[in-house]
Image (cartoon, grey):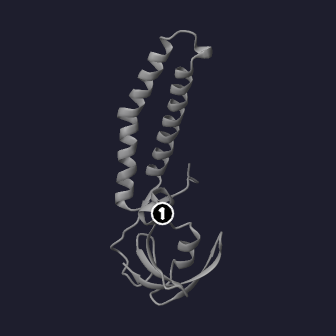
């Protein structure tokens, strides 16, 4: 298991995964087992859609539990306070301006385990984050996206 993938994340991101794991183990797993028990009571399992659905949910829950346990076990906590705000790093919020439009956007760069673009958190594996990591305020950065190349200017790092 020495080759397990590491998952960089904030302490808050790790806590969120631990909370989800706890919920799945203590609440959701029991609900699914109860659904299977009820579905079995309906008789013939070969044509029992409730049973099939409950078994599919059970497989999903067990798979998610396994994934979360691996992510938590291999978590590498990002020390957000350690580095200053002069360089783009994991855990930092970067405000940038698209050139030439001038539209400003801000995202926090996090590990893939806690990425959620709709909440303003992008993965360090995303094209835009990869382009900005190690850069400083004022830098112009070319970003290769699936939609083509774009240029941005880093406005602030926080």
Q: Residue at x 51, y 89 (%)?
A: 139
The total of numbered circles placed on residues is: 1
Which image quadrant is residue 121 in? Answer: bottom left
Q: Which residue is mark 1?
A: 117
**In the image, is residue 76 above or below residue 155?**
above
The C terminus appears in which quarter of the rendering? bottom left
Q: Position of residue 8 (x, y in %)?
A: 46, 62
Which image quadrant is residue 127 in? Answer: bottom right
Image check: 63 left or right of 78? right
**In the image, is residue 116 above or below residue 105?**
above
Q: Position of residue 44 (x, y in %)?
A: 58, 10
Q: Position of residue 83 (x, y in %)?
A: 38, 77
Q: Residue at x 58, y 54 (%)?
A: 3
Of 35 and 90, which appears nearest the observer?
35
Of 114 and 10, which appears nearest the observer?
114
Numbered disc 1: secondary structure = helix
Of 64 and 78, which appears nearest the observer?
64
Q: Position of residue 29 (x, y in %)?
A: 42, 31
Image check: 124 left or right of 91? right
Q: Residue furthest bottom?
A: 138
Q: Residue furthest top?
A: 43
């Amino acid at each position: 298991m020495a080759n397990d993938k590491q998952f960089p994340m904030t302490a808050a991101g790790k806590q969120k995964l631990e909370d989800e794991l706890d919920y799945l183990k203590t609440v959701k797993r029991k609900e699914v087992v109860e659904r299977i028990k009820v579905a079995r009571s309906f008789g013939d399992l070969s044509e029992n859609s409730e049973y099939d659905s409950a078994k599919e949910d059970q497989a999903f829950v067990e798979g998610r539990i396994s994934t979360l346990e691996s992510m938590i076990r291999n978590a590498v906590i990002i020390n957000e306070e350690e580095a200053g705000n002069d360089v783009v790093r994991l855990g930092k919020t970067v405000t940038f301006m698209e050139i030439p439009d001038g539209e400003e956007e801000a995202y926090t760069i996090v590990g893939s385990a806690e990425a959620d673009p709709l909440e303003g958190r992008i993965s360090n594996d995303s094209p835009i984050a990869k382009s900005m990591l190690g850069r400083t305020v004022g830098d112009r950065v070319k970003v290769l996206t699936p939609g083509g190349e774009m240029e941005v200017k880093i406005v602030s790092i926080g």
